[in-house]
Amino acid sequence: MENFKVMCSEKEIQKRIKELAEEIDENYEDKGDVVMVSVLKGGVFFTVDLMKRMKTPVTFDTVQVSSEASNDALNIKKDIDADVQGKNVIVVEDIVDSGRSLKYLKDHFQAMGANNVEIAVLMDKSEKRECDVDINYKGFRVPDKFLLGYGFDQDEKYRNLPYIGYIEE
Ligand code: IMP
Ligand code: MG
């Protein structure tokens, strides 16, 4: 890809994920099992690497929201399979941007009777935030650039890059 600038290398991403896994393990030491809910599609890459580093007993589930355009109404396109009533849930997403989809998902799992719902994101575009949503674990704060790689796509391409970057204009 021409003019591609790496923002986070594979090594930096994996190092930060290890730190986040340790932070989560500490918090859940005496809280029991966790349902890791990965937000399709981009969040899967981060979720898998994070889970592999964790010692807390976890199960894996996925959810997909229908629209990511910031002015469209949100819907659940694919819901989780598990019954999360009384369970600890961590919603794992690639990025928090406006915060609308994560706020929507948090409300959704709380309405399903989860005991506790936390949020983990790899990237935080904090300058774009519109919703007040508490992010419990975050990897990197990043400027407002269109990211590609490690789950981030452009027309479904480039998700498989092991690093994250952007095209310099
Ligand atoms: P929001 O926080 O509800 O605005 O939603 C953020 C969603 O927009 C994420 O789940 C991403 O799928 C998508 N998104 C935001 N920024 C980027 C980007 O830089 N590259 C690719 N997808 C992005
Ligand atoms: Mg997404």
Image: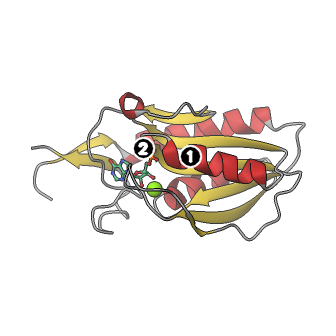
Q: Amino acid at mark 2?
A: Lys
**Mark drawn on residue 102:** 1
The part of the image, by quadrant, that contains residue 169 is top left
Give the percent coordinates (x, y) of residue 40: 52, 63
Q: Nearer the viewer, residue 9 or 165?
A: 165
Residue at left offset 49%, top offset 65%:
66
Give the percent coordinates (x, y) of residue 21: 65, 41
Label 1 Cα crowd, 10 Å radius (few <14 / some 14-19 / many 20+) = many
Is residue 63 found left or right of 169 in the rendered image?
A: right
Q: Are marks 2 and 1 in contact (CB under 8 Å)?
A: no
Residue at left offset 52%, top offset 53%:
46
Give the percent coordinates (x, y) of residue 89: 75, 49
Label 2 Cα crowd, 10 Å radius (few <14 / some 14-19 / many 20+) = few
> Is 84 rendered above or below residue 18?
below
> In which quadrant is the N terminus drawn?
bottom left
The part of the image, by quadrant, that contains residue 6 is top left
Q: Is residue 74 visible?
A: yes
Q: Amino acid at mark 1?
A: Leu
Circle 1: element type = helix
Q: Is residue 54 visible?
A: no
> Is 49 rendered above or below residue 141?
below
Total labels drawn: 2
Is residue 95 found left or right of 4 in the rendered image?
A: right
**Mark drawn on residue 11:** 2
> What scheme was used to colour the molecule?
secondary structure
Which mark's residue is nearer the viewer, 2 or 1?
A: 1
